């Protein structure tokens, strides 16, 4: 009877596939101990190891348009850029909130959008408040929240009164109803279609930027690597699990930080 299961306590040298493990370790310039460990976890051929050890932007990030409301949001943002509408990004005071804001701000500037941002002070509390929404200038017609907004129900009412469209991008758990906004992007939505739900706020913002790049048929460029770098900081600071897409983001982002 043949089976693939191998107990973890077999010494590497006695492993029935010792030559293969040694070969793979050499191919990927990893210590055979790590090669053995990865092998036992199912990384048993070159293709699987390559995907894991050398993630690729073009192939290993999920399609951002699988995220509910992403298409609607991107169409609205492109319209705002074309019509020179003033866009305000509303972020948060922690690392994830600041990096989300930074990366979306830089990306929208790259797309020639007229964009400003606002980060609440700790003393103002977390999330888009009615107070903050009331303070927003009459020249702003589109607000994009990052790392917050899921439970800002009252602020959405103020936005409607002021004629402001709000796109919420967030990763926080949804405890109440969905916010009554133009587009609601959150992989924790109960009707979520996106294959990975543990993104940080900056990860969700990155997906929106990736969607903009795809919609504009813009090549993944040097700037995009800077967004990855910022998303890496947000992902790690918010203690998101370093699996799946977070691992791809952090792998590419760390590589950019330490080239
Ligand atoms: Mn966060």
Image: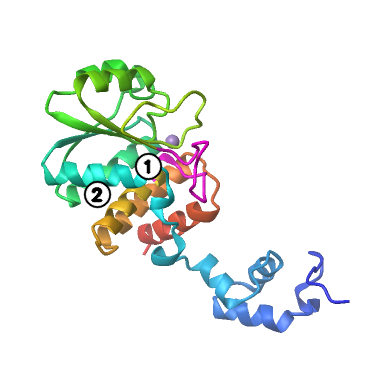
Does the rendering let one see residue 3? yes
> Which numbered circle lies on residue 107?
2
**In the rendered image, the vertical position of residue 17 relative to residue 41, given as above or below:** below
Label 2 residue SS? helix
> Which quarter of the rendered picture does the C terminus lie within?
bottom left
As rendered, which of 50 and 208 lies closer to the eye? 208
Residue 47 coordinates in the image, percent (x, y): 56, 75
Residue 145 vertical position relative to residue 163 in the rendered view, above or below: below
Give the magenta range.
185-202
- Horizontal side of residue 193 vs 132, given as left or right: right
Residue labelled with disc 1: 69
Q: Position of residue 120 (x, y in %)?
A: 30, 25
- Which residue is at the front of the view, 253 or 57? 57
- Label 2: few (<14), some (14–19) or many (≥20) C-alpha neighbours in 10 Å: many
Quick check: 69 left or right of 3? Answer: left
Q: Name the side, left or right, on which 152 lies relative to 137.
A: right
In the rendered image, which quarter contains the N terminus? bottom right
Cα separation between marks 2 and 1:
19 Å
Q: Residue at x 13, y 23 (%)?
A: 138
In the rendered structure, find residue 247 and report the number of the disc placed on it.
Answer: none
Residue 181 appears in which quarter of the rendering? top left
């Amino acid at each position: 009877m043949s089976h693939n299961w191998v107990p973890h306590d077999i010494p590497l040298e006695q492993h029935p596939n010792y030559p293969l493990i040694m070969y793979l370790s050499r191919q990927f310039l990893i210590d055979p101990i790590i090669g053995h460990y990865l092998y036992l976890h199912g990384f048993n051929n070159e293709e699987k190891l390559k995907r894991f050890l050398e993630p690729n932007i073009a192939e290993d990030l999920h399609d951002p348009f699988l995220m509910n409301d992403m298409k609607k949001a991107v169409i609205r943002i492109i319209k705002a850029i074309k019509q020179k509408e003033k866009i305000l990004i509303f972020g948060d005071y922690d690392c994830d909130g600041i990096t989300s804001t930074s990366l979306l701000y830089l990306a929208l500037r790259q797309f020639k959008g007229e964009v400003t941002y606002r980060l609440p002070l700790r003393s103002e509390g977390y999330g888009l408040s009615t107070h903050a929404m009331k303070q927003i200038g009459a020249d702003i017609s589109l607000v994009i929240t990052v790392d917050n907004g899921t439970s800002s129900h009252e602020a959405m009412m103020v936005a409607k009164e002021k004629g402001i469209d709000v796109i919420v991008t967030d990763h926080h758990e949804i405890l109440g109803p969905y916010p009554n906004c133009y587009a609601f992007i959150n992989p924790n939505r109960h009707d979520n279609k996106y294959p990975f739900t543990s993104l940080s706020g900056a990860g969700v913002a990155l997906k929106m930027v990736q969607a903009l790049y795809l919609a504009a048929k813009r090549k993944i460029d040097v700037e995009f690597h800077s967004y990855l770098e910022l998303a890496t900081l947000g992902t790690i600071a918010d203690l998101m699990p370093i699996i799946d897409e977070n691992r791809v983001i952090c792998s590419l982002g760390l590589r950019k930080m330490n080239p």
